[in-house]
Image (cartoon, grey):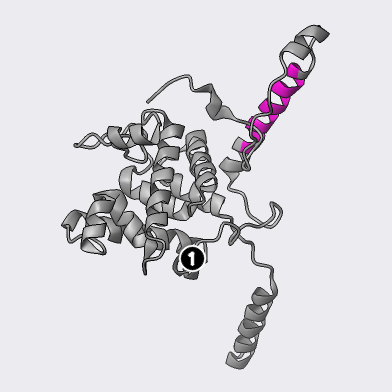
Amino acid sequence: MILSKACKTKMAALFIGLMALMPVQAITQEEMVYDQVSKYIRGSEAAAIAKDICDASYTYDVDPILVAAVFTTESHFDNSAVSGVGAVGIAQLMPSTAASLKVNPYNRRENIFGGVKYLGQMVERYRTWDRPFVYAEAAYNAGPGAVDRARGVPHYTETMNYVQTVEQTRREIWRLAGHEAMALKPYKRSAMTVTETEAPIFPSLKEWHEQHSQKAAAVQTKTTVRPKTARVANSVRSPQPVSYWTTSRPWDTRSSKK
């Protein structure tokens, strides 16, 4: 059967119209961070790093996409990375900076939390400037003193290249999620938050969720059954903060330091 050109045109227009009516699945910032981390890190470690980044970002109210872009540029999320000047871990914290932030830079979660906290301090420092993210990125690389003296991005080749790379990465993360325009808007914590049923879940991340949720449920069942009433009374503890990401806390083992 041979279709005329006019018929093909009508069919194409109908198809496009139907596509426009189909619901578009949203993607959360948490999934965007995981997607970025998983480009460089595989398996459950990628999910754990993405989770730490999102937990820290929500703790210190910092854009997690900005954090992901900075950490991509700093270390590609390699917790064993050590620079020539001694910067350590995923966030590439200098020992003196880590000490001032009261974190252990060799512990992955503390390293991430320290880096996010410091980046948040830089964003807040330049919040009233015309491009706070850009100047925060420059300060993360060259120090806030250099940014203050230059009243902008210092004219250091390394810092200018660094800022350009971070901004390109940040925009690329948003572009791949289908929301490139969001890179130009001020950060809002709830800007990309949707319900679980509306957002696609990456298969490996979903599997990781289910695995650790089952383990957490099993541990909770065991710990709630105690043979002696006196021991229960003596062992009451204040409830631990539950992560917004999952009820399990696999990072609490802290069995080794990288």
| Amino acid marked by disc 1 | Pro
Decide whether residue 174 is among the magenta residues.
no
On the image, the x and y values in percent for residue 203 come to 59, 44
**Under tag 1, what secondary structure?**
loop
On the image, the x and y values in percent for residue 82 come to 27, 34
Residue 161 seen anywhere in this rendered image of the structure: no
Q: How many neighbours does mark 1 have within 10 angstroms: few (below 14), some (14-19), or many (20 or more)?
A: few
> What residue appears at the point 39 percent right and 28 percent down from the top-left corner?
104
- Check disc 1 and report the residue beneath it: 186
> What residue appears at the point 79 percent right and 11 percent down from the top-left corner?
226
Residue 214 is left or right of residue 60, and the answer is right
Residue 76 is left or right of residue 149, and the answer is right
On the image, the x and y values in percent for residue 59 come to 54, 44
Magenta part mainly helix, strand or loop?
helix
- Residue range corresponding to the magenta coloring: 209-223
Residue 53 seen anywhere in this rendered image of the structure: yes
Vertical placement of 2 versus 209: above or below?
below
